[in-house]
Image (cartoon, rainbow, N blue to C red):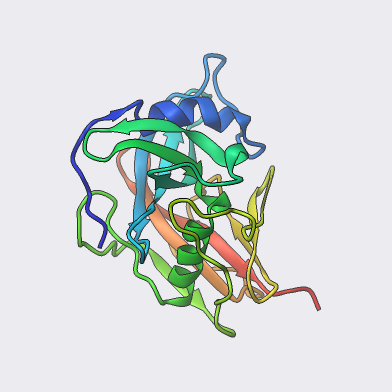
């Protein structure tokens, strides 16, 4: 299990994301002064090799007329990931671990492999803020052949096997079975409270986050659809 260190980060994750979010095609914009971010929730996954930190952050931008919550998967490494310069969000100084390289997790093969394992039911979601504690708010489903075949990479591994495409609607990842895993970068509460996938989906991931008024919302985080016939 990953150990959560209660320590200082310089710069903070929110400070890194304040500069990075406006560069994304799925960022819907806000106030003229840039994002005003607040943590809204999230969860973690474990790297079986114990080398890469994996976190799914929900952050709310309150700078616009209406608050917008984004899903931001991040991977944290102790050394640069070869070939991933375009995916670097920034570097931080960690009070215990030293310098950490923070990457857009959708471009990191370790995070992608563990995300697929979570959806398939082979890996549990972990609490964002406590060590060795499951996150009960994350739900998932999957039907189909095993989602194996996505190579993982260690702290100095290459990124070549991971394919991710950003557009205005989110991020699309190619699954090993030829399907598409689409992340909902802009989070929207489920109207009936049950974050269920569309009928044609073969898998999904859902979770919860905190709204600015303090209430909890649930919604889809990702939807897996089959390969086109």
Q: Residue at x 63, y 61 (%)?
A: 161
Confirm whether residue 195 shows in the render: no
For this orientation, the residue located farthest to the right is 229
Quadrant showing the N terminus: bottom left
Could you say which is closer to the camera, residue 218 or residue 107?
107
Seen in the picture, residue 42 relative to 177 is either above or below; the reply is above
Left-right relation of 49 to 222: left
Confirm whether residue 92 shows in the render: yes
Q: Position of residue 50 (x, y in %)?
A: 32, 59
Left-right relation of 168 to 4: right
Q: Position of residue 114 (x, y in %)?
A: 45, 65
Q: Residue at x 37, y 61 (%)?
A: 47
Query: Would you identify the image quadrant in which residue 22 lies?
Result: top right
Q: Residue at x 34, y 29 (%)?
A: 12
Q: Position of residue 173 (x, y in %)?
A: 64, 59
Could you say which is closer to the camera, residue 206 or residue 211?
206
Q: Position of residue 73 (x, y in %)?
A: 47, 48
For this orientation, the residue located farthest to the bottom is 145
């Amino acid at each position: 299990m990953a150990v959560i260190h209660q320590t200082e980060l310089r710069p903070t994750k929110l400070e890194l994301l304040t500069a990075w979010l406006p560069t994304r095609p799925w960022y819907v914009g806000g106030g003229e002064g840039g994002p005003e971010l607040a943590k809204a929730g999230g969860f973690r996954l474990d790297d079986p090799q114990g080398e890469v930190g994996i976190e799914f952050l929900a952050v709310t931008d309150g700078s616009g007329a209406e608050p917008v919550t984004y899903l931001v998967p991040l991977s944290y490494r102790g050394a640069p990931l070869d070939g991933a310069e375009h995916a670097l969000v920034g570097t931080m100084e960690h009070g215990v671990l030293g310098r950490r390289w923070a990457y857009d997790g959708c471009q990191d093969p370790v995070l992608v492999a563990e995300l697929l394992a979570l959806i398939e039911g082979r890996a549990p979601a972990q609490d964002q803020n406590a060590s060795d504690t499951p996150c009960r708010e994350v739900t998932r489903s999957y039907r189909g052949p095993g989602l194996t075949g996505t190579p993982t990479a260690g702290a100095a591994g290459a990124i070549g096997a991971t394919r991710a495409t950003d557009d205005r609607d989110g991020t699309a990842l190619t699954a090993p079975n030829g399907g598409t895993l689409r992340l909902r970068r802009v989070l929207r509460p489920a109207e009936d409270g049950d974050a269920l996938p569309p009928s044609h989906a073969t898998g999904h991931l859902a979770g919860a986050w905190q709204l600015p008024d303090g209430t909890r919302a649930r919604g889809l985080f990702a939807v897996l659809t089959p390969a086109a016939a």
